[in-house]
Amino acid sequence: MQAGQGLNALLSAIDSLPDAVLVLDSNDRVSHYNAALVTLYGDAARFLAIGKTFADLISELAVSGQRYRALPESANALRDGKRRRVAVALPDDNNDISGTTQIVRSLALHALAPCDYEELTAEGRWLHVATRQVPQGGHIIIHHDITIWKARELQLEHTVLHDPETGLPNRTLFMDRLAQELRRCARDRDRKFGVVLIDVDRFRIINQDLGPEKASAVLAAVARRLERVGRPSDTVAHLEGDAFGCLIDGVLDERDAYDFARRVNQALGEPIRIDTQDIEIKISITIGIAIGNRLASSGGDLVRDASIALSRAKDDPGTKVAIFDSVMQNTTLTRYRLDTRLRQAIRRKELRLAYQPIVEIETFRVAGFEGLARWGREGVDAVTPTIFVEVAEQSDLIVPLGRLALESAARELTTWIEHNPDIFVTVNISPRQFDEHDLVKDLKNVIEDFSLPRESLHLEITESTVVENPEKVAEALAELKRLGVRICIDDFGTGYSSLHLLQAMPYDVLKIDRSFISTLDSSPRSQIIVETITEMAHRIGMRVVAEGIERHDQLAMIRRAGCDFAQGCLFAPALEAEEAARVAISGRLEVG
Ligand code: C2E
Ligand code: CA
Ligand code: CA
């Protein structure tokens, strides 16, 4: 009696719960359900009956399509009473295991073992469903409405996986979809898809000229156009800054990929009008493509391949599209091996600096040296600097390499300045050394450790370093300037040559690129350019170095143009430290 009363009290408590509850007896037959469940089931409540097996209930609901979205195979299998042997057909994407599938699987495999899942009802409500075994036998299934929470969660997920600037999927979601594509390829041997990277050319300039807000509007416009090129099944993502990525279906060969690239180019070829403003902007883009299939090892590798193709497309001014191919594959392998060897060489300090004299034109005295990295035994260099510096720049290796260069220069300088206090060494600095890594701190340490006069170490940076990262570089340069370190702008005339930046940055020295010097005799334009650059630099208080001087006629011309210093094989190539020391101490070169 008491037990019965207790049970009644319990059942009426269950009836008053806001959660929908279904109680099954030890044979998994419905033994009780509450009012909230009737409300939840709506029309489908007619299928609820005390004594009905849970398997029957689910299959009726599924077949009627009333509560569960149809799951015919599993439901039929359940109805046939084969629930322990049911093979559950999982949806195409493994990550979309719906609650229904889970419960069917749980029924089939574990005879209603405890489980928790989330379920979307046909009416669009989200439920958290918990199934628990009752110790005396049977099960209790509790449905808790989480629609509000789910909405917030989905919103948050959307925020986390999309880029607010363009509204497109971000890199995380892009990589996720890429992984999904690869899983599809693993199941379908013939499946192929394209990973397309799209880079807006000179976006930094657009950003500089228009300001961040309008530049952002340009990116959003690019996003909308890209969306229109892609099919609904394609993914168009904003990866970062001016880089977009597309995953495209049904790319069977290079022709399809080129065709897609052509359509992208066409869509972005029309000028972009920024709304409410009368500004029309014409952009150009570069496209790198990798084709993915079941052999691709990872999404990361495919993105890397596509970005190798992209930089190849950039190098070649003619084509703005490249597809990753076997030649690039081999180059990548070589580079990869080089990267490993270089890492080792830096650790073992097998890199050294060679020193190329910089000569004062007026007096022919050696004013200083440019430190140039060398790898390998003296005289038999293992790999040329252009290649290993590029490899180092593409990885984090440029940071230790740069540190090694600064240290080597400082070490030599300590003895040289004892004899020649005005001598300097200029060290090349790459863009990467400005991000994250504390170049300023490294330099302070080196100057202190070797007790160097601050004017004896100069730094050379290229114009593109500044353009790539103006704020960070400006900040670092200002601090270096306060330290008393001199700064030289290298390869001047080959990059973006923003005169505005030239005026805004605290440079002391300008180095005219050797491409102008080598064409001095053949091109009157080069002569005018050298003269103009020199005059302009002088007027804003900079001194000028002409690099790559190989012949006397070139020397005569740069002297006429008013350059202050010359550097090149006419005077001396880069010298090993021992020989450079002799030159540094005497301040003289025997020039032929
Ligand atoms: P760069 O800064 O433009 O250096 C000048 C390059 O011109 C050097 O090539 C030098 O050997 C070469 N050169 C000198 N005189 C002449 C000449 O009369 N005619 C011609 N045709 N070339 C001449 P190198 O040593 O092969 O270095 C290549 C590039 O590697 C450098 O170009 C620089 O960008 C980079 N690099 C070298 N060492 C370092 C370093 O320690 N750190 C960084 N970040 N980059 C470095
Ligand atoms: Ca240089
Ligand atoms: Ca240079």
Image (cartoon, rainbow, N blue to C red):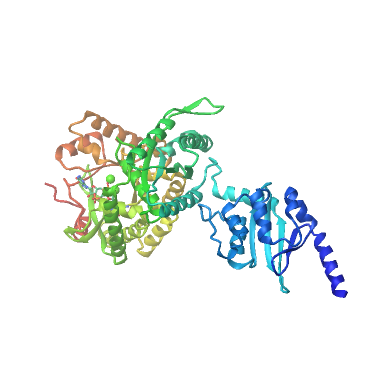
Q: Position of residue 302 (x, y in %)?
A: 38, 51
Q: Quadrant of the N terminus?
A: bottom right
Position of 508 compared to 388: left or right? right
Q: Residue 265, percent across and down?
A: 40, 33
Q: Who's the residue at 65% across and 48% down the image?
A: 65
Residue placed furthest toward the top: 278
Q: Is residue 198 above or below residue 373?
A: above
272 lies above or below 372: above
Left or right: 237 with respect to 22? left
Residue sitting nearer the eye, 588 or 8: 8
Q: Name the residue located 35 percent from the left edge and 49 percent from the top edge.
A: 305
Position of 34 compared to 103: left or right? right
Q: Is residue 483 visible?
A: no
Q: Quadrant of residue 135?
A: bottom right
- Which one is in front, 446 or 318? 318
User: Total label count?
Assistant: 0
